[in-house]
């Protein structure tokens, strides 16, 4: 049995069209209030990774180096410093210990969504937000997101390929089907095209990281943490390739055979 990184990540969806989250400072305060390591320690007993939009290193090809990642809003490992800044922002917006923001935190009614959403509601209290968990049945969850019938929520996003095109165009392009928050930045979308056409890998990585920074600073869809998965197989199974940045890319098993 081995444990390897997956392409599934929990993220925070924010309705950017609904006050008070149409305010970029409010979105920044929420991002600063997250303690990502606590999610990993509680949900997966430490078996998870902190990253941005792209799967983190070392398994992710396009992940930001740690020293760069930690400069993004909310990624500084000093959680208390981040939360102090978040509370200052909230106080400038008129909130505080005597005037807290009450809202519902929506999520899908299955454990991979529901369990981290419980932690999220607890962490939001640190930045003057009192969240009431709203559990939504699976058949209603995605229609609810498409209607933007939520303020904030806990979502899980999976991807089959570790490539910026799959992530950026599918989740952050204007009008994309999986762009549940309705994020739309035409100028940034030009950078999606630019990185996609760049043939030099290092230049493309720098463009990808610049896009990552802009998404994080705008609170597009704060990434909370990435899963790690365990693989189990019998020793008589031969020819199987263990994937480290996808849970589905080796499922065809055309080269797998059993040594009896």
Image: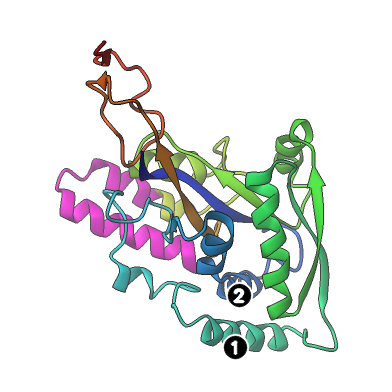
Camera sees residue 14: no
Does 193 appear in magenta? yes
Cα–Cα span, label 1 and label 2? 9 Å
Quadrant containing the C terminus in the rendered view: top left
Disc assigned to residue 94: none
Region in magenta: 190-217
Residue 162: quadrant of the picture = top left
Q: Please state which of residues 15 and 197 is positioned toward the viewer in this rendering.
A: 15
93 sits left or right of 249 in the view: right
x, y percentage for residue 158? Answer: 50, 39
Residues at circles 1 and 2 in contact by the CB criterion of under 8 Å = no
74 sits left or right of 71 in the view: right
Camera sees residue 229: yes
Query: What kind of element bears circle 1?
Result: helix
Identify which residue is drawn at 45% across, 72% down: 75
Whether residue 76 is situated above or below residue 187 in the rendered picture: below
On the image, numbered disc 1 is attached to which residue? 84
Residue 210: quadrant of the picture = bottom left
Whether residue 35 is situated above or below residue 80 in the rendered picture: above
Q: How many other residues sit within 10 Å of disc 2, few (<14), some (14-19) or many (≥20)?
A: many
Identify which residue is drawn at 26% across, 13% down: 257
x, y percentage for residue 63? Answer: 32, 56
Query: What kind of element bears circle 2?
Result: loop
29 sits left or right of 135 in the view: left
On the image, numbered disc 2 is attached to which residue? 33
x, y percentage for residue 28? Answer: 58, 73
């Amino acid at each position: 049995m081995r444990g390897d990184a997956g392409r599934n990540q929990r993220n925070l969806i924010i309705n950017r069209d609904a006050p008070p989250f149409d305010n970029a400072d409010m979105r920044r305060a929420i991002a600063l209030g997250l303690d990502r390591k606590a999610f990993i320690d509680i949900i997966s007993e430490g078996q998870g990774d902190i990253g941005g939009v792209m799967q983190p290193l070392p398994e992710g090809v396009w992940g930001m180096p740690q020293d760069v990642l930690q400069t993004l809003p909310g990624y500084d490992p000093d959680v208390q410093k981040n939360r102090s800044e978040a509370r200052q922002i909230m106080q400038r917006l008129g909130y505080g210990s005597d005037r807290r923001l009450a809202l519902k935190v929506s999520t899908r009614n299955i454990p991979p969504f529901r369990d981290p959403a419980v932690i999220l509601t607890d962490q939001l209290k640190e930045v003057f937000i009192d969240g009431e968990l709203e559990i939504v049945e699976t058949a209603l969850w995605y229609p609810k997101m498409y209607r933007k019938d939520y303020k904030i929520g806990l979502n899980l996003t999976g991807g089959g390929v570790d490539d910026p095109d799959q992530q950026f165009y599918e989740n952050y392009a204007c009008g994309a089907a999986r762009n549940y928050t309705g994020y739309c930045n035409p100028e940034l979308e030009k950078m999606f095209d630019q990185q996609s056409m760049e043939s030099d890998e290092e230049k493309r990585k720098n463009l990808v990281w610049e896009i990552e920074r802009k998404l994080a600073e705008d609170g597009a869809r704060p990434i909370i943490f990435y899963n790690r998965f365990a693989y189990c197989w019998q020793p008589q199974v031969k020819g199987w390739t263990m994937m480290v940045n996808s849970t589905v890319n080796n499922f065809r098993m055309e080269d797998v055979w059993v040594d009896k």
